[in-house]
Amino acid sequence: MPVRRDDTVLVTKGDRKMTEGKVIRIDVANRLLFVEGVTRQRLDGTAVQIPIKPENTMITRLHLDDERRRRALERRGFGSRRG
């Protein structure tokens, strides 16, 4: 399943390993994700997002507002597990 904005992912590699957060931005051209809470401090004190490759993450919670995405999961044998 492709990662989309508002999915919750777990970083599996790098120095931010085991950090979980919501995907806030996706750079399609460079194939990078930006995850909420994965930041670093610049020398002037501002916080900047660290780009992460999608292959270094694992989806932990899907954002299921998209009907096509829900139907794809049902086709694969995963029922809609909403509340």
Image (cartoon, rainbow, N blue to C red):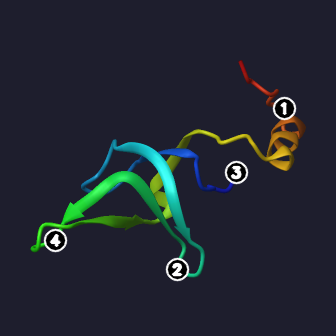
Amino acid tagged 2? Asn
Residue underneath mark 2: 30
Q: Looking at this rendering, what residue extends furthest in the bottom direction?
A: 29
Residue underneath mark 3: 1
The mark found on residue 42 in the picture is 4
Q: Is residue 74 left or right of residue 41?
A: right
Q: Nearer the viewer, mark 4 or mark 1?
A: 4
Q: Position of residue 57 (x, y in %)?
A: 47, 52
Pick the residue in front: 66 or 18.
66
- Return the disc, 4 or 1, that comes first in the chain's sequence: 4
Rounded to the nearest angstrom, the CA distance separating label 3 from label 1 is 13 Å
Rounded to the nearest angstrom, the CA distance separating label 1 from label 2 is 32 Å
Amino acid tagged 3? Met
Q: Position of residue 23 (x, y in %)?
A: 51, 53
Amino acid tagged 1? Gly
Q: Position of residue 15 (x, y in %)?
A: 24, 55
- Return the disc, 1 or 2, that comes first in the chain's sequence: 2
Q: Position of residue 53 (x, y in %)?
A: 46, 65
Q: Nearer the viewer, mark 1 or mark 2?
A: 2
Q: Looking at this rendering, what residue extends furthest in the left direction?
A: 43
Q: Secondary structure at mark 1?
A: loop
Residue underneath mark 1: 77
Rounded to the nearest angstrom, the CA distance separating label 2 from label 3 is 19 Å
The answer to the question of whether label 3 and label 1 lie on touching residues, with beta carbons closer than 8 A, is: no
Q: Secondary structure at mark 3?
A: loop
